[in-house]
Amino acid sequence: MAARGLMENPALFAGFKKTPWGAVERFLHYNANYGPLPHQLALHHVGEMLQDMMTKKERAEMTRSSGSMVELLDWLDERVVVRRYGEAGFGEGVEMERTSL
């Protein structure tokens, strides 16, 4: 039971009620730089973490549009602010910040 909750919100035991955006940024960074997970598994983890931030329709579109980690990052970059390691505020955000279209 805790495993599913931790997949959806890795910061659960740090007191966060939902996944802080910084946890998503850190997951993307760690996955890209320290031994990547298979793409489908990484995509599943990201989708679970975004459950409270994006609609089911948006997450389904993300899954359909992302055949690789590069495509996933491109898809996210078009919609939200994804800070990269070394940028100010990387891994610190609580709320997801949408880009203006």
Image (cartoon, helix red, strand yellow):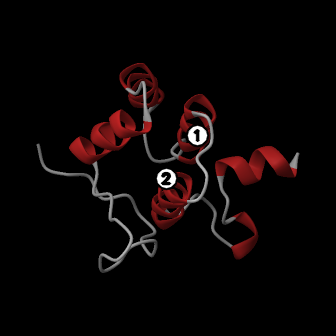
77 lies above or below 70? below
Q: Is residue 22 above or below residue 19?
A: below
Q: Residue at x 39, y 70 (%)?
A: 85
Q: Nearer the viewer, mark 1 or mark 2?
A: 2
Looking at the image, do the residues carrying marks 1 and 2 touch, with CB atoms under 8 Å apart?
A: no
**Location of residue 93 with respect to 9 vertically, above or below:** below
Image quadrant where residue 93 sits: bottom left
Residue 11 image-quadrant placement: bottom right
Q: Position of residue 68 (x, y in %)?
A: 43, 31
Tell me which residue sits at (45%, 30%) in the image. 59
Say which quadrant the C terminus sits in. top left
Q: Residues within 10 Å of mark 1 (few under 14, many from 20)?
A: some
Q: Looking at this view, name the residue that lies furthest to the left.
A: 101
Q: Position of residue 96 (x, y in %)?
A: 38, 58
Which quarter of the rendered picture does the N terminus lie within? top right
Q: Earlier in the sequence, mark 1 or mark 2?
A: 2
Q: Amino acid at mark 2?
A: Ala
Residue extending farthest right:
1
Determine the residue positioned at 61% across, 52% down.
35
Crowd class of label 2 (few under 14; some 14 to 19; many from 20; radius 10 Å): some
SS assignment at label 2 = helix
Going by the image, does 44 lie left or right of 78? right
Seen as rendered, the residue at the extreme top is 64
- Where residue 52 sits in the image (x, y, percent)? 52, 46
Mark drawn on residue 32: 2
Compared with residue 94, is residue 24 higher up or lower down, i.e. above or below?
Answer: above
Q: Which residue is mark 1?
A: 42
- Whole-Å distance between the Cαs marked 1 and 2? 10 Å
* Residue type indicated by callout 1: Ala
- The tally of labels here is 2
Q: Which mark is residue 96?
A: none
